[in-house]
Amino acid sequence: MQTAAKADRLTRSLAAPFLAVNRGLFVFIAAIIAGALVSAYWISASTRVKLLQCPIIPSATRAVDQNAARSPEPAPSSARFTSLGANRTPSEPAGLSPLPQRHPPAPACPAYFRWIHEDLRPWRATRITRETLDAAHRYGPKFRVTVIAGRLYVARYGRCFQTRTVFTQWGILQLLRRHAGRVPDLDLMFDCQDLPVVDAAEHAPPPLFRYCGSEPTMDIAFPDWSFWGWPELNIKPWDALRREIGEGNAVLHWTRRAPYAFWKGNPTVGTDWREQVRDGFRESDLAKQCTHRYKMYAEGRGWSVSEKYILACDSVALVVRPRFHDFFSRGLLPLLHYWPVRDRGQCRSIEFAVDWGNSHPDKAQEIGGNASKFMQEELTMDHVYDYMFHLLSEYAKLLRYKPTVPDGAVEVTVESMTHGRRGLEMEFMVDTMLNASGSAAPCELPLPFSSEELETLRRRKADAVRLVETWEEAVTN
């Protein structure tokens, strides 16, 4: 033990001078080794973290009945890509482009958007040449709309009733502002009358846009001018009016309304109409007309713009068998959103509907509620603009030529349209003007109908109408 202890002391005494001289070297070497170990650990950990942070995008699944497919994402604008170093923070490595932002997937469009494909089907095979479009002149279009690089050009060929032209073009201009950089170049003809005219039996029909369509014609239904307001009738833009009607519905419950059918219109365009025009339609506040349990919708000589106001009322809409459709009404179903009324023997049919509804208040309220919910949720201005966007985008894909500014066309801008406006026209334009900075991406366009789905839909509507007629006949016989 003593020998071992002496040997240990001797070793330490001999090594002491060496350790004193080289202690700094050993500390330095130890630091290097420790640093290497720590660095290796962090490199490994960083690798693991990066692997864990890799985005995992699950496959999107959707119910079969929606049949929706995502539209191609629009090409990013140049604003998303800046020159290297121009907007780089001091800590950002040079030579690396910033990663594009990830946006949540666009919601699915309402089911009635599927009719876009059907409306454009006549031109899918042959597509549209400039000559095909010019052939629409024989139907008397009132103006031509051309969009080039996001700018709107209009050539006028005739006059439209009141401010239909003004607010239709204003709506298209707002679309270009809402979806800045997304709307493709296009060229189309537009008519603003209430009767579709392009015969479905025509061999090479020209595409013609208007506010309505029908089964025997191929006119392309487009949102009507009143979504941005109807100054002559003191009807507010749809966004504001829709909210006011919804608020009124909440105040006056269906059970507290008059248990009768109500209709207000102008069947003869005579004295009553002129008196209303002279008075500025001060008594025509649509938000205050939802006071009856049942409201009637009946077309006149042509399509009527009043359908959306009636359906929004939370009343049971008594729809006299329609001949025309607008862009959204094909998404409505009899006995789900409205009560079908015969076009012949209307009085008996309406009387039966009122008696049935008063005897089945829960069912009647459900029908009225489904319609108003459709108007409040499926026919928002977001969806109106998205429908316009998808319709025009799909139409532009069919053009076989590059659009150019047509002869006689002038550029339409916010400044040119608001210049000299006053009164309700100016007020409605201010209320509906959108920012030019764009907005979120449009909703996701659903897939086209299959032939089987179309047949099922037609059969379902026909069966519902026939069921109501059967009930009526059982009472009258």
Image (cartoon, helix red, strand yellow):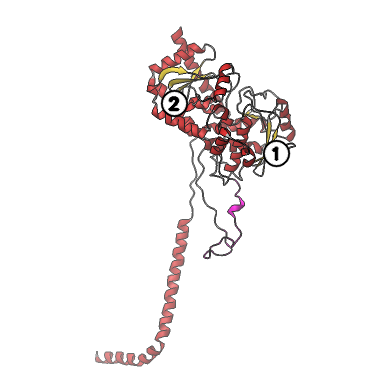
Of the residues shown, which amino acid type is indicated by label 1? Val
Dot 1 surroundings within 10 Å: few (below 14), some, or many (20 or more)?
some
Q: Is residue 95 magenta?
A: yes
- Which is nearer the N-term, disc 1 or disc 2? 2
Q: Which residues are magenta?
A: 74-97
Dot 2 surroundings within 10 Å: few (below 14), some, or many (20 or more)?
many
> Residue under circle 1?
410
> Residue under circle 2?
314
In percent of width and height, residue 397 lies at 65, 38
In percent of width and height, residue 466 lies at 50, 16
Disc number at residue 204? none
Q: Is residue 446 visible?
A: no
Q: Give the foreground label among 1 and 2.
A: 1
- Left or right, residue 181 beside residue 206: left
**Residue at left 47%, top 10%?**
473
- Left or right, residue 120 beside residue 459: right
Q: Is residue 305 above or below residue 32?
A: above
- Left or right, residue 340 beside residue 8: right
Of the residues shown, which amino acid type is indicated by label 2? Asp
Q: Which element is circle 1 on?
A: strand
State the predominant SS element of the stretch in magenta. Answer: loop
| Count of numbered circles in the view | 2
In percent of width and height, residue 5 lies at 27, 90
